[in-house]
Amino acid sequence: MSLHIATYDVTDDGRRARRAKVLLRCGRRVQRSVFEVWVGPGDLAALRREVGPLLGAADAFDIFPLDSRPGRPRIRWQRRPERWDAVIAL
């Protein structure tokens, strides 16, 4: 099994929800339309067959393999949130 990033741009809410359910079975959601999925070579083909019928004419679906060799940890960073000295609520 290897780690992939799956991402999509879907115009229909129903197809979007069905695609998310498929991807959640083999991974986890990172952002609204971005998932980390663990799939093997045979699983990748099955995933493509399952997702294919859910694509509309204007939809996009991409899977990007990540380098999961030992000794190559994930590197992640985020910008620090701005510090607010005061909050005004009306």
Image: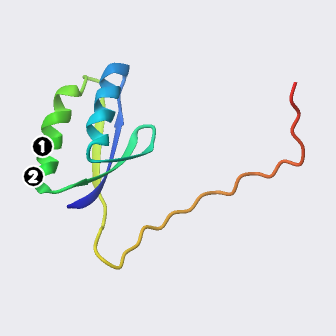
User: Front-most of 33 and 22?
Assistant: 22
Look at mark 1 in the image and give the residue it sits on.
46
Q: x, y (%) of residue 39?
A: 21, 54
Q: Quick check: 48 left or right of 73?
A: left
Q: Quadrant of residue 17?
A: top left
User: Front-most of 28 and 63?
Assistant: 28
Q: Is residue 12 visible?
A: no
Rendered-image quadrant of the N terminus: bottom left
**What residue is rendered at 26% in x and 36% in y?**
22
Residue at the extreme bottom: 71
Q: Quick check: 44 left or right of 24?
A: left
* Label annotation for residue 42: 2
Q: x, y (%) of residue 77?
A: 56, 62
Crowd tier of the residue under label 1, counting other residues whose Cα lies within 10 Å: few below 14, some 14–19, many 20 or above:
few
Q: x, y (%) of residue 62?
A: 29, 43
Q: Is residue 12 above or below residue 25?
A: above
Q: Is residue 83 visible?
A: yes
Q: How many marks?
A: 2
**What residue is rendered at 37% in x and 75% in y?**
72
**What residue is rendered at 29% in x and 28% in y?**
18
Q: Quadrant of residue 9?
A: top left
Q: Is residue 76 above or below residue 39?
A: below
Q: Quick check: 45 left or right of 63?
A: left
Amino acid type, residue under disc 2 in the picture: Gly
Q: Secondary structure at mark 2?
A: helix
Q: Secondary structure at mark 1?
A: helix
* Label annotation for residue 67: none
**What residue is rendered at 29% in x and 68% in y?**
68
Q: Could you tell me if the residues under marks 2 and 1 are in contact, i.e. CB atoms within 8 Å?
A: yes
Crowd tier of the residue under label 2, counting other residues whose Cα lies within 10 Å: few below 14, some 14–19, many 20 or above:
few
